[in-house]
Amino acid sequence: MFIGREAELQFLETRYHAAGGQLVVLYGRRRVGKTETLLQFCQKKPHVFFACRECTDRLQLKSFSEKLLKENIPAGKYVSQFSDWEQAFRAVLELPYGESRKLLVIDEFPYMCRGNTGIPSILQNLWDEILKDENVMIVLCGSAMSFIEKDLLSEKNPLYGRATGIYKMKEMGFYDAVKFFPDFSDKDKILAYSVLGGIPHYLRQFNPKLSLSDNIKQNILTKGCVLYSEVDFLLRQELRETPIYNSLIEAIALGNTRLNDISQKSLVDNTSKTSVYLRNLIELGIIEREFSVDAGIKERANTSRGTYKLTDNFFRFWYAFAFTNYSDLEAGDVDGVYTYEIEPFLHEYASFTFEEVCRQFVQAQQKKNALPFRYSRMGRWMGKTTVRDPESPNGMRMAETEIDIVAVSRGFREYLIGECKFKNKPFSYGEYLDTLTKLSPQKKNAGFYYMLFSESGFDEKITDEAGADPAIRLYSLKDVVGG
């Protein structure tokens, strides 16, 4: 059963029905579901779907020729293989699809270009000469994101400015990902997403009929299962010096988020080298550099500023729990590792993911026009703000702190503050008061609204105050998971 990807399918359908020739580039990291999405799009449409292989150029051309000639094009009466790529691409115009678009999908297009670096130029010349005015749609798909962005689409490269649509696929959000586990409890949906993230290939490995703990043990921790070797396989496919990348990712997974801390923890020589390695991981979509929601252009341009976090939940889980216990897993002690090293810490580990799910909830509310104002940017806030301190003369002091969610309107005239508690006890009144004191100086010139999220409910005083103040909204775990 195909799940999600409505936006991607709508994008492809829009290009399919648009006037003129269509040259579409769809790309994204491995396992994100590009091929499945394209196959779903191609259903009930006459098409040619060609999956490139890592092979010689001659063998690639032979395979491509065979695929096209199977469509009973006129050239099949005279040749058994095209002599060159120009002839092969030109033959797309002969596809016998009547009034329907002549649809060609080339999956893993970078493999084709690796065997013959002239292919983008050949395609560009044909596009400019004839294909752009014909009833054709060519979709170029690839996982090598750096190649797509830097060698295919950037200025001075052959296909620059030719693509009529460019779509970078990312992992699924929470609300699509949990459709893989419709019978899980609300809590287990959060936990499962914190373990697997939104990569369809990973989500399919879990059996929705098994408990979360059995799924983790059988489909992640057991030697020989698909996900047991996934991280190592992906890193070796995409990167050299995998031991260094292992150290860097582990450092981030264990809570080291600043450049200097990551460099020291991973024992990389200096921060300049660390920055290069981290940039490669960012290009792969495994980590990202995060700034406070109010950070300006100057701060974002400073390579030493910002924090790093793993965007792939499965990588974060693997390095937080499995990588550090790899010897025991290799020895088959799956139950021991889960019982003593994972289970006691899994709930706390998932609190970080709960914050991200709450941010996705806020995004969904904006789409429904259900927020008190329309925000222009939203994310985590990091910096100095006022906090309660009973020992201070006025009961307040300045301190470094974070706010889980801050959404601001244009001009910073309105603020939405979100605080997320994923724990086995209610959101306390003290925590509520702490939330209200943050960013107090900004309240002089801006309106403030609050969204409080809690797995285990709220202190009765909070409920009473929220009932009397429309600027304060409370959301349960059921509210958040239900979207």
Image: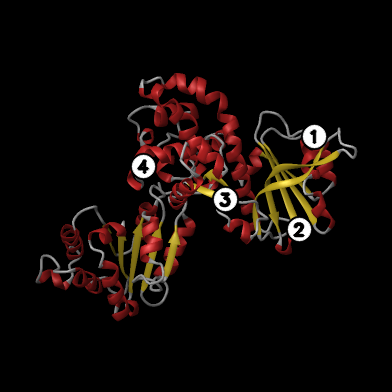
Q: Which mark is residue 414?
A: 2
Q: Quadrant of residue 102?
A: bottom left
- Evaluate whether residue 14 shows in this view: yes
Helix, strand or loop for disc 1:
helix
Of the two numbered discs 4 and 1 in the rendering, the one whose residue sits closer to the viewer = 4
Of the image marks 3 and 2, the number of the one nearer the N terminus: 3
Residue 75 on image: x %, y %: 14, 72
- Camera-near label (2 vs 4) is 4
Q: Which mark is residue 304?
A: 3
Nearer-N-terminus badge (1/3): 3
The amino acid type found where label 2 is placed reads Glu
Horizontal arrangement in the rendering, residue 349 relative to residue 91 (left or right): right
Q: Position of residue 118 (x, y in %)?
A: 25, 68
Mark nearer the N terminus (4 vs 3):
4
- The residue that label 4 is drawn on is 241
Q: Tag 3's secondary structure? A: loop
- In the rendered image, which quarter is residue 142 located in? bottom left
Disc 4/disc 3 C-alpha distance (Å):
23 Å
State the CA–CA distance, disc 1 to disc 3. 35 Å
Considering only order in the chain, which callout, 1 or 4, is on the residue closer to the N terminus?
4
Label 1, on which residue?
Answer: 430
Mark 4 crowdedness (10 Å alpha carbons): few <14, some 14-19, many ≥20 = few
Q: Is disc 2 placed on a helix, strand or loop?
A: strand
- Closer to the eye: label 1 or 3: 3
